[in-house]
């Protein structure tokens, strides 16, 4: 009942811990993500402010040049293009390459250009065929400055124009054609002075082709762009922090940390909960097995003690009918005393093993002598149970380092196990010299060991599926394994080819011997 309540508490507590860990990890990740996004937004706002300032400076430069042209050219006197603007163009409006007077129908009244003859003709051809179509000449607003930014034949054109009403009452437009290449080569470098304290700038067109400045594609989310609102509106100014690559790496590192830390925390809590549940369940099972051990040991002690006391009382009260019966009662008392001695030795050795004690005094000796001593001690019980034990021993066994009493206890436990499960059939005890060890094996013709139990038979308190009607405490073979390992060997179990089980242990030969 108590174990069921504990199990129910685990089933409620563990999911609650996992849910709480999941919620905590989610809000931790969300908080860290919001903090990262806030930092990115702050950087973006700062860069956007810088981009707006640079765009305003460029547009102001172009507008000042436009107003200078409009001031120098008189729409009522077309000759002012050549006589007034042209001589001052290089100093007053260096970015303006051509100036035109155009009527409301788009016809060129007068024009002048600072380029050579070939470039002038090429510009006039493009203007008449393409550029004039981009000008809004249908609804003139006097004194309103307008711009047209177009690209033809992979060349960019920027036109600034204003409508004027002449003295004759006609609408005439002054058009200033800027040299965009001059802006890229001469103006932009002065507008975007680059040093270690300033961000990186570039200008791209509608198809993201680079017009000016370095490639900022690696800056990623830290790139901010701002379009020119009125003049070079087909271009965009892009701004990125100089340490964009470092910020990108830090952002990826933070992102991995934001994802990894909650997952690690959740995993650790999950593993801790599983381990806690496993340890608690194992402790509960161990406690249950110890309780079963105490019950089995108590039962094992109670039965021979009752028999010894009963026959001792009969002998003491002189209620024995004959001398033969008296000897029989004495034999029974001796046999049950042997059982008590064997059981108490196992319990004491097991207690020492549980407490980390029980050191063995290893001395060079003959394993056959230790096995023979154990067989002599066990022979009385085997004769009383009607079980024959056949000993087969290899000649010239190599010497080993052993504790005689411990080895005897291990052999007695093997024989006891074989007698219990083999019934009243002969048991074979075999000593075999291997290349570098000596094997002690006991075979019984019993039901054998299930294949899934071969590795468990040496566990503490373990009793196989055929053990229910068989007395025992479940600690005998665990002592055999511990004694074998303490001697540098190992314990093993297998099923015999002809039926039954073979359980034994191996002890390494002493150094200096022929086998070793």
Image (spheres, grey):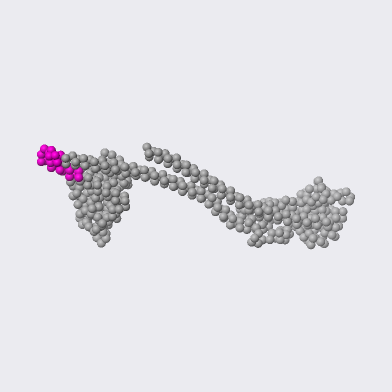
Q: Nearer the viewer, residue 205 or 106?
A: 205
Q: Residue furthest right?
A: 168
Q: Name the residue: 85% across, 58% down.
A: 80
Q: Is residue 320 left or right of residue 370?
A: left
Q: Residue furthest front?
A: 317
* Residue 319 belongs to magenta span: yes
Q: Nearer the viewer, residue 272 or 400?
A: 272
Q: Is residue 181 left or right of residue 9?
A: right
Q: Is residue 290 left or right of residue 50?
A: left
**Residue 82 appears in the figure:** no
Where does the image place residue 502, in percent across and percent down from the top left? 26, 47
Quadrant of the frame with the N terminus: top left
Majority secondary structure of magenta residues: helix
Where does the image place residue 344, in percent across and percent down from the top left? 24, 47
Q: Residue furthest left?
A: 323
Where does the image place residue 349, in percent across and percent down from the top left? 27, 50
Quadrant of the frame with the C terminus: bottom left
* Residue 211 belongs to magenta span: no
Magenta-drawn segment: 314-337
Q: Nearer the viewer, residue 509 or 37?
A: 37
**Residue 417 appears in the figure:** yes
């Amino acid at each position: 009942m108590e174990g069921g309540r504990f199990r129910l508490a685990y089933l409620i507590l563990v999911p609650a811990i996992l849910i709480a860990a999941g919620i905590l990890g989610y809000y931790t990740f969300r908080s860290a993500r919001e903090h990262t996004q806030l930092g990115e937004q702050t950087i973006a706002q700062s860069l956007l402010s810088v981009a707006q300032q640079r765009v305003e400076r460029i547009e102001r430069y172009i507008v000042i040049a436009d107003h200078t042209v409009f001031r120098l050219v008189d729409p009522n006197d077309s000759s002012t293009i050549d006589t007034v603007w042209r001589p001052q163009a290089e100093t007053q409006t260096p970015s303006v390459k051509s100036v035109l007077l155009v009527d409301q129908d788009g016809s060129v009244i007068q024009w002048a250009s600072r380029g050579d003859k070939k470039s002038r003709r090429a510009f006039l051809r493009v203007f008449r065929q393409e550029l004039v179509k981009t000008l809004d000449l249908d609804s003139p607003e006097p004194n309103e400055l307008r711009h047209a930014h177009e690209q033809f034949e992979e060349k960019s054109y920027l036109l600034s124009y204003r409508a004027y009403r002449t003295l004759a009452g006609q609408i005439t437009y002054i058009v200033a054609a800027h040299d965009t290449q001059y802006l890229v080569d001469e103006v932009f470098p002065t507008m975007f002075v680059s040093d270690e304290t300033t961000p990186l700038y570039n200008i791209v067109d509608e198809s993201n082709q680079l017009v000016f400045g370095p490639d900022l594609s690696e800056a990623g989310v830290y790139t901010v762009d701002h379009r020119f609102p009125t003049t070079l509106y087909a271009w965009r100014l892009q701004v990125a922090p100089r340490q964009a690559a470092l910020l990108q790496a830090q952002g990826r590192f933070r992102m991995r940390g934001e994802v990894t830390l909650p997952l690690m925390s959740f995993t650790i809590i999950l593993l801790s909960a599983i381990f806690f549940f496993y340890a608690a369940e194992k402790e509960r099972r161990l406690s249950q097995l110890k309780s079963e051990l105490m019950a089995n040991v108590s039962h094992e002690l109670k039965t021979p003690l009752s028999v010894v006391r009963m026959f001792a009382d009969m002998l003491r009260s002189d209620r024995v009918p004959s001398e033969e019966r008296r000897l029989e009662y004495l034999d029974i008392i001796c046999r049950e005393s042997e059982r008590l001695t064997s059981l108490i030795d196992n319990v004491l050795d097991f207690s020492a093993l549980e407490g980390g004690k029980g050191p063995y005094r290893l001395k060079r000796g003959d394993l056959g002598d230790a096995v023979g001593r154990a067989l002599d001690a066990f022979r009385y019980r085997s004769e009383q149970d009607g079980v024959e034990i056949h000993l087969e021993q290899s000649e010239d066994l190599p010497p080993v380092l052993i504790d005689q009493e411990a080895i005897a206890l291990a052999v007695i436990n093997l024989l006891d196990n074989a007698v219990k499960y083999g019934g009243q059939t002969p048991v074979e005890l075999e000593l075999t010299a291997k290349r570098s060890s000596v094997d002690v094996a006991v075979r019984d013709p019993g039901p054998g060991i299930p294949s899934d139990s071969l590795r468990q038979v040496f566990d503490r308190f373990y009793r196989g599926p055929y053990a229910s009607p068989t007395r025992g405490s479940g600690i005998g073979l665990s002592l055999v394994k511990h004694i074998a390992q303490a001697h540098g060997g190992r314990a093993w179990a297998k099923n015999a080819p002809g039926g039954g089980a073979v359980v034994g242990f191996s002890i390494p030969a002493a150094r200096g011997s022929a086998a070793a």
